[in-house]
Image (cartoon, coloured by chain):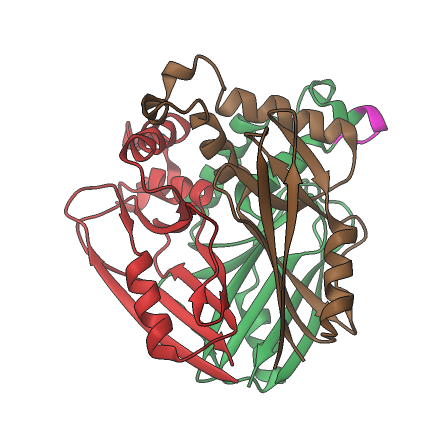
Chain colours: A red, B brown, C green
Amino acid sequence: MKSYREELWFKVSKRRAYINITPRVEECLQKSGVKEGLVLVNAMHITASVFINDDESGLHQDYEDWLEQLAPHEPVSRYCHNRTGEDNGDAHLKRQVMGREVVVAVTQGRLDFGPWEQIFYGEFDGGRRKRVLVKIIGA
Amino acid sequence: MKSYREELWFKVSKRRAYINITPRVEECLQKSGVKEGLVLVNAMHITASVFINDDESGLHQDYEDWLEQLAPHEPVSRYCHNRTGEDNGDAHLKRQVMGREVVVAVTQGRLDFGPWEQIFYGEFDGGRRKRVLVKIIGA
Amino acid sequence: MKSYREELWFKVSKRRAYINITPRVEECLQKSGVKEGLVLVNAMHITASVFINDDESGLHQDYEDWLEQLAPHEPVSRYCHNRTGEDNGDAHLKRQVMGREVVVAVTQGRLDFGPWEQIFYGEFDGGRRKRVLVKIIGA
C-alpha cells in the first residue's frame, strides 16, 4: 500500500472565501503515484471547510448569503463561544453545514469526478495562515 | 490491495426523491470480493446527495419539508446561481445539508452497519440521468 | 493491508450531549498497529453524529441552541416520523447537520490533526445504549 501526505497552506485576508483547490489536489495525486485508492482532503482548522460543489461565482454568493442567514456573524454576543474572547462562533457553525472533509476516489491515477465536481476550501474566519491536509492511500 | 468501481445510474422524473440504494451497494461489494476495507459512495452530481438514515416514509417527508424551509426552491430569483439560466440554486444548498458522500466500513465481506442504517440517493434536481459512484478498496 | 475494528458504546442519560471520544479513538489506533492509513469513525445509529470540532463548552451550548432552532424537538407532532410512535424526528434532522462520520488520516501512527481538532460523539436521542464504529485500514 502506498501513502502520501501534503499540507496546503492558505492565508485569506477576508473573513470568508471559497477557493477552488482541485488543481492542487490533482498535483498531490500525481506526486503520490497512486493509481487506485482514496484521497482524503480535510480542513485542519475547525472554522473552515473542504467541500465539493460547482465553481460558479453566483452559487458562492448564495452560500455566503445562506450561511449568514443560518448562522449570522453578528451580533457576536449571540454565541456563548465568543465569551472566550473569540468572535468566530458563527464560523464553527457554518463549517458544520459545509463539512470538514471530502473523500474522493482515485481511478487510473485521476480524481474520479462527475462533470462539475470541484473541491473547495471554505474559509469562515480568515486573516491568518491555515492548512488543509491531503492524504492519499492506495496502490 | 483490491479495488472495485461501479457507477449506479438514476433518472428521477420528479424534482426531488429519496431512494434506498443499499441493495445495489451490497451487490457491488459482493462483486468486489473485498472482505476488509472501506466503501465510498458519492453523488457524482452537485445537486444530489448520498446519505445514511432510516427507510421510513414519514421521515423522508420531514426531510422534504425541512429542506424546503431551509432553502426554498421558489422564487427561483432568490438565488444568484439561477441568473445563469438554471433553476436549481436551492438544490446546491440542500445537497450541502444532506452531504455528498458516505464512507462505510467493510467487515467480513459485509457493509458494517448499525441496526437501522440504510444508504440513500437524495435527488434535489431530477428529470435527467445522474450517477452515483461506488468505490471499494481493501483486501 | 492491516485492518482493525472496534465498537465504542455509550449510554447518555440526557436527550442530547456532546462527548469527546478522541482518546478512545487514539487507543483503537494504538491497538491496530497501523502507521499510515485512514480511520473511519461513524455513528451506528441514525439519531447520533460523529463530528470534529473544538472542545469548548460554550461552543457546545451554541450547537445545542442552534440545532434546536433549525429542528426543534417540540411540538413532537411537527414531524411525520413521530406518527410511528417515536418522538425523535428532530434527532434525525439534527444528525444530518452535524454528520454521520469522520475520516481521519493516520500518519506515523498518530491521528493527523490540526491544532484544535477533537472527535465528538453527538447524541440527539439519548436514554439507551448506542454505538460508534471505529474502522482502521492501512499499513
| Residue C109 counted in the magenta span | no
Side of C121 relative to A67 (left or right): right
Query: The N terminus of chain B lies in which quarter of the figure?
Result: bottom right
State the residue lying farthest toward the top.
B75
The residue sitting at 33% across, 71% down in the picture is: A28
Q: Is residue B101 above or below residue B18?
A: below
State the residue lying farthest toward the left.
A13
State the residue lying farthest toward the right.
C85
Look at the magenta stretch and give its main secondary structure.
loop
Query: The C terminus of chain B lies in which quarter of the figure?
Result: bottom right
Q: Residue C64, position in %: x, y?
A: 52, 37
**Total labels drawn:** 0
**Res B70 visible:** yes
Side of A33 relative to C84 (left or right): left
Is B30 in front, or is C19? B30
Side of B105 relative to C50 (left or right): right
Q: Residue A78, position in %: x, y?
A: 35, 30
Q: Residue C106, position in %: x, y?
A: 48, 76
The residue sitting at 79% across, 52% down in the picture is: B23
Side of A5 relative to C104 (left or right): left
The residue sitting at 47% across, 71% down in the picture is: C105
| Residue C85 counted in the magenta span | yes
Q: Is residue B2 above or below residue A14?
A: below
**Res C73 visible:** no
Query: Within the image, what quadrant is residue B98 found in?
Result: top right
Is A128 in front, or is C55? A128
Query: The magenta stretch spans which residues?
Result: C83-87
Q: Residue C130, position in %: x, y?
A: 75, 54
The residue sitting at 47% across, 41% down in the picture is: B46
Is C97 in front, or is B42? B42
